[in-house]
Amino acid sequence: APVKVTKICCIGAGYVGGPTCAVIALKCPHITVTIVDLNQARVDAWNSPDFKLPIYEPGLEEVVREARGRNLFFSTDVDKGILEADLIFVSVNTPTKKSGVGAGFAADLNYVELATRRIAQVATSSKIVVEKSTVPCRTAESMRTILEANSKPNCHFDILSNPEFLAEGTAITDLFAPDRVLIGSLQTPEGISACASLTEVYANWVPKDRILNVGLWSSELSKLAANAMLAQRISSINALSAICEATGANIDEVAHAIGYDTRIGPKFLKASVGFGGSCFQKDILNLVYLSESLHLPEVAAYWRQVVEMNEHQKRRFSKRVVDTMFNTITGKRIAVLGFAFKADTGDTRESAAITLIRDFQSEKAYVNVYDPQVVEEQIWTDLAEASPLVPEEQIKKQVRICKSAMEACKDAEAVVIATEWKEFNEINWEEVYQSMNKPAFVFDGRLLVDAEKLRNIGFKVVTIGRP
Ligand code: UDX
Ligand code: UDX
Ligand code: ADP
């Protein structure tokens, strides 16, 4: 019979491991969940008495408040976590490699491998090891080889792939009611039994018909495929937005019209200044790398184009800003509203705002940035990384971080909306207009504001996907 899971350990207390396992703890009071991480500061934040958690996610605090100390624990004692668990999630980071073979494309599996080796070294009893991080196809196979080559007698490891599909900003609602939970296993009796054990955990709150059991490699590839196809939709709508701007069609109307086709569907068709986030670009580049390693160059080129279109969209937008402002923004002050890669998160990984600000800096403009969630230190780090050749003093001379949208817009010549924070729609635009230099421009990179309303106030408004 399948092992009944009573103790779960999650290695990695990040954007994925933290919320996922906190929700498992909430929904399964009979299971003890310990989330371990090597990063002491991060663990301390998860444990902070006043719930100053290391990531901002609506609803997360409530979940942690209810479960922490009851059956949810955060710790830096990785070995103890491994030793006691019957099921271990590996939820460590898998960034794109910065050097060596596959640099810029392949996933850096060093963290996954180190965590896997640690499991093999420490475990004294059989475990179900679940790959949660997004990894290239066949990583589970490597994990299995490492575990089998290093295990003690009587220790048996079953590997499952259980990719996470939550989106940031809606992590908790996504976890409470997932479209589906995907569990991949080897189709052996042991694999199927391990799969049943994990299925039982999710079945505490997810309807059984939404828990999909597939082969190990299908599961791994499905995660990359889902993100690649979502990103492809955005690049497709963004490519159409360029045509709209050149022809007089309106991208909102086009998206609305095509979304009515039930085969296409209305979601994820919002033109923007480009997608960001830790997943889309990384996973597509992974898929490109995989295709190339499999000697499928045409397939690789097809997916690579999705990322290239995204880069193009960002460049096109900053060029439009410069063109509209009489072909020069030198010495002009630009207010950038939003720095996170999307609303309702403090995460800035691959955020389009970073590229835009870098472009404005190289045009010698002054930039005021405001974001309601991103911490100041993160903005400086991201901007420094984006312009490695520019000295920090220079960046700090050109960029100012502001405490409110109002403060950012004061004395600016243009406002650029980079993130679709709801509060940008609710600011007093009349007052903003009064405080700006004239002509006052608004560049809406998120189809957020009511352009007609702003025009009536006096703004010159430029919107993605409209002439
Ligand atoms: C298409 C559009 O569906 C229709 O809305 C438009 O008005 C005209 O073009 P049609 O060409 O008649 O209609 O057929 P469709 O069912 O869309 O199939 C087109 C091709 O795609 C066929 O060769 C079909 O076999 C193929 N196809 C379709 C696939 O290979 N896989 C699929 O999942 C769907
Ligand atoms: C994504 C996937 O949605 C999720 O299933 C997966 O587990 C991780 O990657 P996430 O990156 O958190 O989640 O955010 P998502 O909502 O998908 O947005 C990604 C980027 O696309 C954001 O920059 C967003 O602003 C942009 N986007 C999204 C658009 O530009 N237009 C859209 O219509 C939707
Ligand atoms: P993700 O978005 O995939 O969740 P994050 O970077 O937010 O990625 O989180 C990954 C976490 O994994 C980090 O907090 C990191 O410190 C932790 N981590 C990486 N390697 C190990 C390891 N071998 N043991 C424990 N924790 C690890």
Image (cartoon, grey):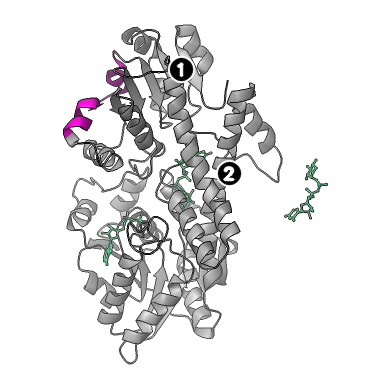
Left of 248 or right of it: where is 95?
A: left
The residue where tag 2 is placed is 233
What is the crowding at mark 2: few (fewer than 14 residues within 10 Å), some, or many (at least 20)?
A: some
Q: Quadrant of the C terminus?
A: top right
| Image location of residue 117, percent across then percent down | 30, 76
Q: Secondary structure at mark 2?
A: helix
Q: Which portion, as a residue range, is magenta?
A: 393-411
Using the rendered view, name the quadrant where residue 33 is placed. bottom left
| Quadrant position of residue 139 | bottom left
Image-based side of 416 in relation to 69, left or right: right
Residue depicted at 52% across the width and 78% down the height: 186
Would you say the beta carbon of the disc 2 residue lies within 8 angstroms of ligand 2? yes
Q: Residue at x 16, y 32 (%)?
A: 393
Q: What residue did someone put label 1 on?
A: 324
Tell me, for residue 257, which label it has, or none.
Answer: none
- Residue pictured at 43% horizontal, 31% vertical: 420
Which residue of the protein is positioned furthest toward the bottom in this rendering? Answer: 153
Task: Look at the picture and state if 284 lies above or below 190.
Answer: above
Between 288 and 171, the residue placed more toward the observer is: 288
Say if disc 1 is inside 8 Å of ligand 2: no
Mark 1 vs mark 2, foreground winner is 1
Tell me residue 133's x, y (percent).
Answer: 40, 62
Q: Which of the marked residues, 1 or 2, is nearer the chain's N terminus?
A: 2
Q: Is residue 77 visible?
A: yes
Q: Is residue 86 above or below residue 236?
A: below
Above or below, 149 against 34 in this view is below
Q: Is residue 44 left or right of residue 434?
A: left
Element type where label 1 sits in the image: helix
Marks 1/2: CA–CA distance: 28 Å
Whether residue 399 appears in magenta in the rendering, the answer is: yes
Amino acid carrying mark 1 in the image: Thr
